[in-house]
Amino acid sequence: MLLEDKISQDYVQAMKARDPFTSSVLSFLRAQIKNVKVDKRLEIVPDEDVISVIKKQVKQRQDSITQFKSGGRTDLAEKEEKELVILKNYLPPEMSAEKLKSIVEEVVLASGATSIKDMGRVMKDVLSRVAGQADNQMVGALVKERLSGI
């Protein structure tokens, strides 16, 4: 089953269960997916694109939580955290740090990277291999750490 279909089914279930919070989060997510569908002129949005939309939403929620907490608005931060939990249910499980480090090491050795100047090329290869299973900032930090040690 496509991820887009799963989100739509869960949205219908939330509506039937009269869960306004979950249905509003999923409604907004469905609207963002529809925007991708219209922009790219697709009939069916591939799971990779749906995951990137979800990751963008997760990032926005995380930024909002940080800002709300620093502004003393714990009520809004809690709301964003609840939305974050719902969105993370649709993301693939995160890759372990050890596995990610081994992939970074493999790519660095295979590409022959010799300095921090090669970071862009290494990042591109690593991100294509992890395919949404790791946070881009974490990948960047590991690649930078590895290339700085050369």
Image: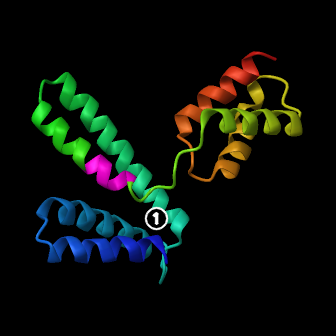
Secondary structure mostly taken by the magenta-highlighted segment of the chain: helix
Q: Residue at x 89, y 33 (%)?
A: 112
Question: What SS does tag 1 mark?
Answer: helix
Magenta-highlighted residues: 83-88
Residue 138 position within the rendered picture, expressed as x and y whole percent measured from the top left: 56, 32
Q: Please, which residue is most extreme toward the bottom here?
A: 43
User: In the image, is 10 to the left or to the right of 37?
Assistant: left
- Quarter holding residue 23: bottom left
Q: Residue at x 34, y 54 (%)?
A: 87
User: In the image, is 147 to the left or to the right of 60?
Assistant: right
Is 84 included in the stretch rendered in magenta? Answer: yes
- Quarter holding residue 103: top right
Q: Residue at x 38, y 51 (%)?
A: 88
Label 1 Cα neighbours within 10 Å, binned few <14 / some 14-19 / many ≥20: many
Compared to residue 30, the image places residue 87 above or below, namely above
Residue 117 position within the rendered picture, expressed as x and y whole percent measured from the top left: 75, 26
Compared to residue 107, the image places residue 131 above or below, namely below
Residue 75 position within the rendered picture, expressed as x and y whole percent measured from the top left: 10, 36
Between residue 34 and residue 82, name the one nearer to us. Answer: 82
| Residue type at tag 1 | Val
Compared to residue 36, the image places residue 101 above or below, namely above
Compared to residue 76, the image places residue 115 above or below, namely above
